[in-house]
């Protein structure tokens, strides 16, 4: 079942420095992250298109804004879950419940096996993101998670990276960390780096900056996605994702094979936290 953007309710969270819009009915997607001082929206824009079914594909136009990937990023089959795990995981485009309080929006996705909650708490230009994963199944469940926050960046802006080892592609090449290039470059690359203690990764330029900060114990890896007009081939995008993640691969079965997955035990909960800071 597809969801049309004009039927999706939008919840807002704001301060003098930052305004955020969230669509709980559409995977709790953050569709807007605006620096009120400059007017810059840091998130890629586009219609909220995508399906709720297990065969949904989130390539190209459906890949916009900020979503969460769990219990896999790429489509795969896992015997423990007893089903095919869909593209970008269970959470995309599906309806979440939500609660609001002063300076906070909390959204929860409830599945037969687990509940997944993301709470956004705004303090000025700083956004604290708290996650909680709770088991409702009697079976231990393997999982990986990746924050999927697609940034709308400008050519010439540059990366700032602290608290990471080498960032490399699957083939072992060093990631391209040169200043951001334009659509005409036709380049796309996914790479990973190991967090050392605490990571602080950002994009900076004359129109402001955004930084992601998190602890190794919460997300031991960085996933870095770059598309300068190189993906997908039929409708290229210009987007960047700084992705705190629990594994240096996108498929849960690959993470299990290399023992970089996590396991949600029955009657247990897991919590972690990411921080975003925006400056004009």
Image (cartoon, grey):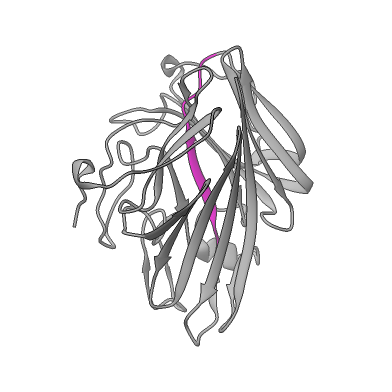
Query: Which residue is the extreme one toward the right?
Result: 197
Task: Please state the horizontal and vertical placement of residue 135, each as a whole percent of the image.
Answer: 52, 77
Q: Is residue 174 visible?
A: no
- Quarter of the figure with the N terminus: bottom left
Q: Quadrant of residue 89?
A: bottom left
- Foreground pick, 124 / 113: 124
Task: Please state the horizontal and vertical placement of residue 40, each as a whole percent of the image.
Answer: 47, 21
Residue 15 is a magenta residue: no
Task: Please state the horizontal and vertical placement of residue 189, each as a whole percent of the image.
Answer: 52, 34
Task: Please state the horizontal and vertical placement of residue 45, each as a whole percent of the image.
Answer: 36, 30
Q: Residue at x 53, y 33 (%)?
A: 15
Query: Which residue is the extreme one toward the bottom?
Result: 138
Say above or below: 161 vs 114: above
Query: Quick check: 26 left or right of 109?
Result: left
For the record, the magenta segment spans 143-155
Q: Residue at x 25, y 61 (%)?
A: 53
Say above or below: 101 vs 202: below
Q: Residue at x 55, y 61 (%)?
A: 144
Query: Quick check: 197 left or right of 106?
Result: right
- Quarter of the figure with the C terminus: top right
Q: Quadrant of residue 236?
A: top left
Say above or below: 208 vs 63: above
Say above or below: 52 vs 173: below
Q: Is residue 262 visible?
A: yes
- Foreground pick, 221 / 209: 209
Residue 147 is a magenta residue: yes
- Foreground pick, 7 / 135: 7
């Amino acid at each position: 079942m597809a969801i049309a953007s004009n039927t999706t309710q939008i919840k807002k969270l704001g301060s003098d420095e930052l305004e955020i819009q969230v669509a709980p009915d559409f995977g709790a997607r953050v569709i807007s992250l605006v620096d009120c001082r400059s007017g810059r929206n840091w998130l890629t824009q586009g219609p909220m298109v995508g399906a709720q079914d297990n065969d949904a594909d989130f390539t190209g136009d459906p890949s916009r804004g900020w979503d969460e990937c769990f219990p896999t990023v790429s489509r795969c089959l896992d015997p423990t879950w007893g089903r095919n795990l869909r593209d970008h995981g269970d959470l995309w485009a599906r309806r979440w419940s939500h609660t609001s309080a002063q300076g906070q929006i909390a959204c929860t996705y409830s599945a037969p096996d687990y509940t997944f909650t993301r709470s956004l708490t705004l303090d000025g230009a700083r956004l604290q993101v708290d996650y909680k994963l709770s088991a409702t199944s009697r079976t231990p469940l393997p999982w990986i998670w990746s924050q999927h926050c697609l940034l709308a960046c400008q050519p010439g802006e540059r990366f700032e990276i602290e608290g990471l080892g080498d960032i490399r592609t699957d083939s072992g090449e060093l990631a391209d960390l040169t200043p951001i290039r334009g659509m005409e470059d036709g380049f796309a690359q996914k790479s990973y780096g190991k967090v050392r203690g605490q990571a602080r990764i950002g994009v900076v330029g004359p129109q402001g900056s955004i930084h992601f900060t998190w602890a190794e114990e919460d997300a031991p890896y960085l996933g870095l996605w770059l598309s300068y007009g190189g993906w997908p081939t039929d409708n290229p995008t210009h987007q960047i994702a700084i992705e705190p993640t629990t594994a240096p691969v996108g498929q849960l079965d690959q993470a299990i094979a290399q023992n970089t997955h996590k396991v949600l035990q029955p009657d247990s909960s897991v919590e972690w936290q990411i921080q975003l800071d925006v400056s004009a």
